[in-house]
Amino acid sequence: MPERLLAPEGTAASVAGFSHGGAVMVAEDFGEGSRPFVLLHGIGMGRSVYVDLVARLDGRVIGLDLPGFGEAPEPERTLTMERHADLVAAFLRERGISDAVLIGHSMGSQIAAEVAARHPQLVAGLVLAGPTVDSASRSIRVQARYLFLDLLGEKPLVLWRGAREYLRGGPNLVRKMRATIVHQPEKAYARVTCPTLVIRGERDPLAPVSWCRQILNAIPDARLVEIPDHGHGTLISDSELAAAAITAFADDLR
């Protein structure tokens, strides 16, 4: 059975699998309020790494483990970003959600953008944190080098949580990485119409300023927030500034 990993003690939470199109993900749903925050994790991660961020968000929060990550079982075949998006959209419809604030981190930003582009009626706002993959650096070798450089400056907590989840990512991690690299999120950005917040750590080599500016140019109602002294893991530890930016963004949607 999937475990409760995000909800504070004393908070009613549901943790359950959701199956659609031959793939299964795990959702932890707790809190109350309109415009629920729906958290989509990065490559090799799972919902458990975002406990610091979730503790700072007020309202309903839904943390997802995408297929083959965290507590979700490995799918028979690796999902594309588009298939991930359709799975998330089916989940939102099943839960009766049509006003989600999607928070996508790293790979999750690519999926979140596809949800907003393919299923706009389900999304009230879009948060792209450490958005990948920079169109000028679209190869596993380059992205791996950027990730290594980012990790050199990360805090031990980020390294520990990341290493634990990468190990849980299973033997198909390289194949999953290829699925993120071949995806062209700029095609999704061109179709996004909802308000969008782009967040990058000022030391994040995987989401350079030039790439974030391309995103701002592609999405009409988009803004950028840079988090000082943070790298790619800006939502994982010391997330106070990122959480404040997300909260202010969500408040503006009301």
Image (cartoon, rainbow, N blue to C red):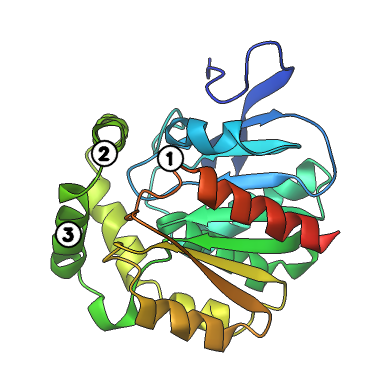
* Quarter-of-image position of residue 19: top right
Q: Secondary structure at mark 3?
A: helix
Residue 100's label in the rendered image is none
Most extreme residue toward the bottom, as rendered? 217
Q: Amino acid at mark 2?
A: Lys
Q: Amino acid at mark 3?
A: Ala
Q: Which residue is mark 2?
A: 155
User: Alpha-carbon neighbours of circle 2 within 10 Å: few (<14), some, or many (≥20)?
Assistant: some
- Report the side of 137 relative to 19 (left or right): left
Residue 134 position within the rendered picture, expressed as x and y whole percent measured from the top left: 33, 75
Residue 79 position within the rendered picture, expressed as x and y whole percent measured from the top left: 43, 55
Contact (CB < 8 A) between labels 1 and 2?
yes
> Quick one: quadrant of the C terminus?
bottom right
Determine whether 27 is above or below 216 in the image.
above
| Among numbered discs 1 and 2, the one appearing first in the sequence | 2
| Among numbered discs 3 and 1, the one appearing first in the sequence | 3
Q: Can residue 21 be seen at all in this image of the molecule?
A: no
Q: CA distance from mark 1 to mark 2?
A: 10 Å
Q: CA distance from mark 3 to mark 1?
A: 24 Å
Q: CA distance from mark 3 to mark 2?
A: 18 Å
Determine whether 219 is above or below 139 in the image.
below
Residue 238's label in the rendered image is 1
